[in-house]
Image (cartoon, grey):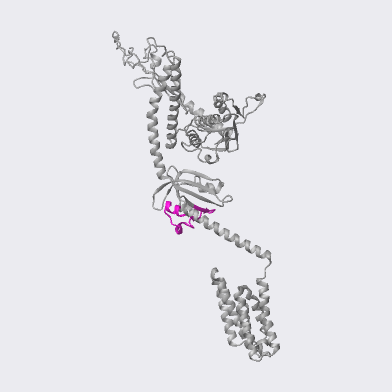
Amino acid sequence: MFISLMVVGLYFLPLFTGSEFTNNNLIVDTAGAILSGVTFVVAFGAYWWTPQKYGHLASAFVYLLLVLTTATLVLSTGETGSPFIALWIAVAVFAGIFGVPGLAILLFTVIAYLAYAFLTHATPSAMIIGSIAGIGPLIASFIIWHTKTEKDDTKDKAYKDLASELSQVANKSDVVINAIDDGVIAVDKKGVIQLINPAAQRIIGWGKDDAVGLSYKSVVKLHDHTDTQVTVSNDPVEKVLASNQEIRSDLFSVVTESGKKVLLSIVVSPIGQVGSGVIIVFRDITNAKREEREQAEFISTASHEMRTPVASIEGYLGLALNPATATIDEKARDYITKAQASAQHLGRLFQDLLDVTKADDGRIGNSPTVINVVEYLDGVLEGLKPKADEKDLRFIYKPRPADNTVIGRMLPPVFYVNVDKDHLREVIANLVENAIKYTPAGDVVIDVTGTDADVIISVADSGIGIPAEDISHLFQKFYRVDNSDTREIGGTGLGLYLCRRLTEVMGGRITVKSEYKKGSTFEVILPRIDNEEATRLIEQAAEKAEKEAQKPAILPIGSTSTMATEAPNTATQPQTTSSAGAVSELMPAPSPAPVPAPAPVVPQPKPTMPHPISTPNPAPTAPIVSPYASGRPSVVVPKRNENKVNQP
């Protein structure tokens, strides 16, 4: 553009000077001016409006126009004696930018001119000047633009190899992302969708052209487990952008473009630094959830129906083993003892199945209570220590070591949590029992540590460990590690699943680290509360208990509040215990007015059939307790005689 504009200026310069130039060779003719003007216009347009992919072609075209303009000026102003010969040299030096084709075109042009000059009987000096001015710049251009050192070649090759490798990786990534069945959406730090794969488009009903560039909130319309649209406080994408921590959940659903509700299993992972962006990976689990509900209903019904006869079998076996109710020889006692152990194991299995169905249906209760974790676990672990002693394992509770001689002067740490104590007991008992069960020899170490936000309960053992390929499946339902070390150890594959669900109900999470043949460490992480919050919650619970104690007792229909005090000598029916352990006391209603009482009539008792397992003089027997895995014993009480005579 600059050279063309300069030539056009030389064409119009005589009009502004008002006199003729003494050197007529500087006067630009009309043809040269027109070519220069065309070159300027084309160069200006190419500079501002040419697409990037056509930039090289446009530059080559503009350069050819400039070469043609310069050659025209040289030929029209004295050829080898032209003052524009320097302009030709400057233009020819840049021919090497366009590679061998650019150099070849200019070399052919120079050779053609030299042949023309020779045929027109040019002087030897003109031939020499023409050769130097024509070929010299081309040689210089080749040296400048095409001579590279070995180091430059190495760098150029490395750059090309890197570019090729990156291109291959990008292509492979696109192929993989587009081929997987899980939906993948990439979101930048502002929440704008940058990538969406075909599976995501199919699940949520949005096309790629429609979704890319929009906010994820308008495309992925998430709802929580209460079927309410998520807010900033429970939006997993917002949480990951703020915390840079991965979130996994099966509790969200999405409303598609057509208004259909789809249940999702979603994983939101951060990209790079905090707030840089996230990757959302999700899949449709609507059908899987429906099948799980159907399975849970079947398991719940079957377990409930089978648990009742198993409890009866266990109870009658207990009565058979009771010397007060039956007399058997030692061989029969051995058989019955084994049968009772099997019945107890079957009962624990049914109880686990019922607990699993409650966990899946969200029917697990939660009654949070302020707990000092160190003190509470001390009592829980005291009952588990004999199991470790039976296998000669070292059982260590770090906050209160049994072999410490200065334990009286130790101040154990205080960690408060507000959780359901029954849930916590079941989780820790299950983890410790597993540690004991899968540790042939060595240590079982329980520790309680914490941060400002969390309390961490760890259960570590030096047992058989867990293979790396099994760790990711460890907390799934019915999953058991299947190898030579575990086949002889019984289990249902439900314990760790229940631990995970109960921990989630308490607002925490459970993790595992393990190395095969070297042991495992399970960590239960619960939200911590400070001393002030714990004190406040304890006071609230005490006030609530006091108010409940002050409420009047609910009496049976027909009774009055003064009966217990005004008629202390009234005969009452003896207390009876139902199969659920509840005690009911029936009291006669008072007469509205005193009337003479008739002579009492005592009805004769009806004959009763003896209990099939009763003895002529049966001794009173205690209820038989069957300890199930959930920590809630099942009580089996012999059926009471319903034909007793009611006393007046």
Q: Residue at x 67, y 77 (%)?
A: 139
On whether residue 262 falls in the magenta region, the answer is no
Give the quadrant of residue 3: bottom right
Taking the view exactly as shown, the residue that stands out farthest to the right is: 125
* Vertical position of residue 445 compared to residue 50: above or below: above
Task: Please give the count of numbered marks on the rendered protein.
Answer: 0
| 273 on left or right of 320 | right
Picture coordinates of residue 286, whole percent (x, y): 41, 45
Q: Position of residue 583 (x, y in %)?
A: 40, 20
Q: Quadrant of the N terminus?
A: bottom right
526, above or below 33, in the image: above
| Front residue (pair 241, 348) | 348
Residue at 41% across, 51% down:
256
| Front position in the image: 423 or 196 | 196
State yes or no: residue 197 in magenta. Answer: yes
Identify the image quadrant of residue 307.
top left
Q: Position of residue 472 (x, y in %)?
A: 52, 41
Residue under the point 54% across and 68% down: 53
Which residue is found at the position 45% from the left and 31% from the top? Answer: 352
For the C terminus, the quadrant is top left
Is residue 35 visible to us here? yes
Q: Residue furthest top?
A: 599
- Measured as percent of width and height from the top left, residue 577 is found at 39, 19
- Which picture quadrant has residue 391? top right
| Residue nearer the viewer, 57 or 48 | 57
* Residue 529 shows up from this direction: no
Magenta span: 185-214
